[in-house]
């Protein structure tokens, strides 16, 4: 058995043990197509790991920034559900009980096998500029605008809804996905526009995705530029 095969086998065994001991009803799909459990149903909620470099990255830097980088590049994703579904099925145990449930030797053994595996890439969030004083020079403003808004639709499709609404959403139910939440937000905005004088912010919120949601009798204010 190759070293790569041993790493895969060790990780699968660790994940299977975690599911059993914590009683988590979430499956895993690994980069070779294998699943945990082995009889995972095609429609089951599952965490998908695209490559072993993703595991190596989490072993070396187990923090939210690493996880966010892996998420936006689809190296870790969720099948048949959303982050809200995953959170809803989190272990219903205390931190102390969670630590006691873990096989620390198995966890250490598995982690060591991935310690020196190349983490791969890309790492887009590592390219974010650090905070610094602004000069308000035209050249700097142009650069900043391009940096934040010059990304392709492929980037925004990773985390916006289908209509690419670039404002906050309104979740009325725990199981709602981002598409439903954005539609509910637009419904509230439209309702407010139909019953009272509109503000620039409420108009922008309502037409941010689709002008068809705008009522025909809006009392919109006159904007002077």
Image: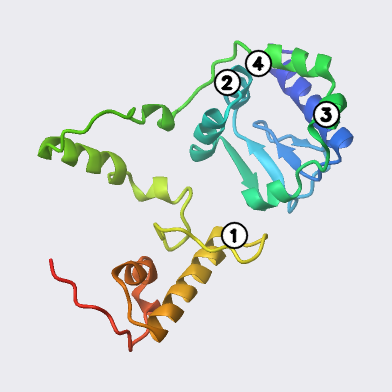
**Residue at 75 percent of width and 24 percent of height:** 11
Label 1 close to label 4 by CB (< 8 Å): no
* Most foreground residue, 196 or 89: 196
Label 1 close to label 3 by CB (< 8 Å): no
Disc 3 packing (10 Å; few <14; some 14–19; many ≥20): few
Question: In this rendering, which labeled residue sits more in front, label 1 or label 3?
Answer: 3
- Residue located beneath label 3 in the image: 96
| N-terminal label among 1 and 2 | 2
Task: Give the Cα distance between marks 4 and 2.
Answer: 12 Å
| N-terminal label among 1 and 3 | 3
* Most foreground residue, 127 or 73: 127
**Residue at 77 percent of width and 19 percent of height:** 107
- Residue located beneath label 1 in the image: 177
Which label belongs to residue 114? Answer: 4
Disc 4 packing (10 Å; few <14; some 14–19; many ≥20): many
- Residue located beneath label 2 in the image: 61
| N-terminal label among 3 and 2 | 2
Disc 2 packing (10 Å; few <14; some 14–19; many ≥20): few
């Amino acid at each position: 058995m190759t070293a790569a095969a041993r790493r895969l086998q060790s990780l699968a065994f660790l994940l299977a043990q975690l599911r059993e001991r914590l009683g988590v009803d979430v499956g895993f799909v690994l980069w070779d197509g294998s699943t945990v459990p082995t009889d995972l149903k095609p429609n089951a909620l599952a965490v998908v790991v695209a490559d072993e470099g993703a595991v190596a990255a989490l072993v070396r830097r187990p923090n939210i920034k690493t996880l966010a980088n892996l998420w936006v590049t689809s190296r870790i994703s969720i099948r048949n559900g959303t982050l809200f579904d995953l959170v809803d099925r989190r272990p219903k145990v205390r931190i102390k009980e969670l630590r006691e449930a873990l096989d620390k030797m198995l966890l250490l053994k598995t982690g060591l096998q991935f310690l020196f595996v190349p983490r791969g890439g890309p790492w887009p969030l590592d390219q974010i500029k650090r905070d610094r004083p602004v000069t308000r020079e035209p050249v700097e403003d142009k650069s900043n605008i391009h940096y934040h808004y010059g990304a392709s639709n492929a980037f925004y499709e990773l985390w916006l809804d289908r209509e690419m609404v670039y404002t906050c959403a309104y979740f009325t139910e725990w199981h709602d996905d981002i598409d439903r939440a954005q539609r509910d937000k637009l419904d509230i905005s439209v309702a407010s526009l139909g019953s009272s004088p509109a503000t620039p912010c409420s108009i922008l919120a309502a037409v941010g995705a689709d002008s068809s949601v705008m009522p025909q009798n809006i009392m919109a204010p006159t904007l002077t530029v």
